[in-house]
């Protein structure tokens, strides 16, 4: 099995691999912000209280389960 096959054997493995990459902004961050931050009632994310959508924040596995933008336009 090569590295590609190993990290793409299932969504969970790919999500864990992507989450481990040291990136400042990733596609899943932008999608999260569009879907959840825009309509969130919190005034600031830095107020010390937890994000109501923490399970999806910084979560490539959540992003991988979303419909692709290309599919949404079709």
Image (tube, rainbow, N blue to C red):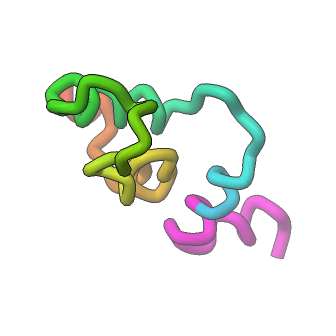
Q: Is residue 27 magenta?
A: no
Q: Quadrant of residue 22?
A: top right
Location of residue 66 in the rendering, given as x and y in whole percent from the top left corner: 30, 47
Instruction: Choose between 56 and 6: the one closer to the eye.
Output: 56
Horizontal relation, residue 53 to residue 61: left or right: left
> Residue visible at 60% across and 26% down?
25
Residue 33 in the image, given as x and y percentages of width and height: 34, 28
Q: On screen, 2 above or below 66?
A: below
- Vertical placement of residue 27 versus 38, above or below: below
Q: Position of residue 11 (x, y in %)?
A: 50, 66
The one nearer the camera, 16 or 44, is 44
Q: Is residue 45 left or right of residue 58?
A: left
Q: Which residues are magenta?
A: 1-15
Name the image quarter holding the N terminus. bottom right
Task: Identify the residue at image location x=26%, y=50%.
Answer: 52
Q: Which residue appears at 25% of the width and 24% of the height?
A: 43
Q: Quadrant of the C terminus?
A: top left
* Side (left or right) of 29 relative to 52: right
């Amino acid at each position: 099995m090569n590295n590609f096959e190993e990290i793409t054997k299932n969504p969970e493995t790919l999500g864990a691999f992507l989450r481990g990459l040291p990136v400042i902004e990733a596609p899943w961050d932008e999608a999260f912000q569009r879907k959840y931050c825009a309509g969130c009632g919190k005034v600031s994310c830095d107020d010390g209280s937890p994000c109501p959508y923490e399970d999806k924040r910084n979560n490539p596995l959540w992003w991988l389960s979303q419909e692709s933008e290309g599919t949404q336009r079709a």
